Amino acid sequence: RGIKYVKKINIIVLVLVCIIYCFLNDTLALSYNSKMWIEDPVVGSENYEKLKVRGWVLSEDKDSQVMIYIDGKRTEGKINRSERNDVTNKISGYGGKESNPMPGFESTVDISGYKSGTHQLRVDLISKSGEILNSKVTSFRVRKATSKMWVEDPVVGSENYEKLKVRG
């Protein structure tokens, strides 16, 4: 009874260590190693009509895709991929340059339809089989542009005879 009990405890501890390791490394799937970073938008930044989303991903799955969500809804904009030698030269592993020829991603998302306030941005790295390899979340604020207007001409009480000059 004693040896079987110790083996069960060891297995439980091993499983718990694996779970904690996964959460600490922000990984949601273990089939491929991956790493991700969101560079823009900066947490809490104020944005008006357009939101620039930019960052990089590294993955052993060379066919993985980046998907962008705002408040849980997938965005419609095109996601451009680019070379990022600064990333591939600095961070080793994850398939290297062979699996990551274009680790950079950038998209401009129309946020004109979103209400003022804080919103959640999530970027997912999806494997060719459809599983989430990695996911990062940040927040940004939408601020509706305010406008001000002042009419300088015509001045109240002025008389105009032939042409009305409007200036402001």
Image (tube, rainbow, N blue to C red):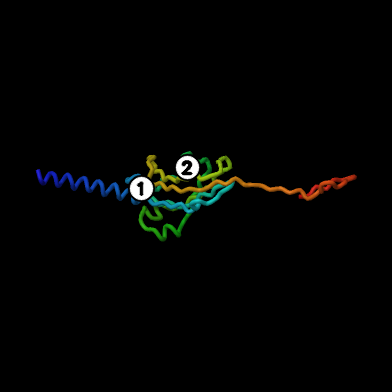
The first of marks 1 and 2 along the sequence is 1
Q: Which residue is at a point 47% across and 42% down the rendered structure image?
A: 69
Q: Which residue is at a point 71% across and 48% down the rendered structure image?
A: 149
Residue type at tag 2: Tyr
Circle 1 Cα neighbour tier, 10 Å, few/some/many (<14 / 14–19 / ≥20): some
Q: Which residue lies most toward the right here?
A: 161
Q: Nearer the viewer, residue 13 or 66?
A: 13
Name the residue beneath numbered marker 1.
27
In the displayed structure, does residue 137 sit left or right of residue 160?
A: left
Residue 163 x, y percent position in the rendering: 87, 46
Residue 30 x, y percent position in the rendering: 32, 46
Q: Which residue is at a point 60% across and 45% down the rendered structure image?
A: 144
Q: Element at badge 2?
A: strand
**Mark 1 vs mark 2, CA separation in Å:** 18 Å
Residue 84 x, y percent position in the rendering: 46, 56
Residue 41 x, y percent position in the rendering: 50, 51
Q: Which residue lies most toward the front here?
A: 157
Q: Nearer the viewer, residue 115 or 122?
A: 115
Circle 2 Cα neighbour tier, 10 Å, few/some/many (<14 / 14–19 / ≥20): some
In the displayed structure, does residue 4 sit left or right of residue 23?
A: left
All told, the count of numbered labels is: 2
Which mark identifies residue 100? none
Which mark identifies residue 69? 2
* Residue 68 visible somewhere in the drawing: yes
* Residue 102 visible somewhere in the drawing: no
Q: Nearer the viewer, residue 41 or 58?
A: 41
Residue type at tag 1: Thr
Q: Which residue lies most toward the left here?
A: 1
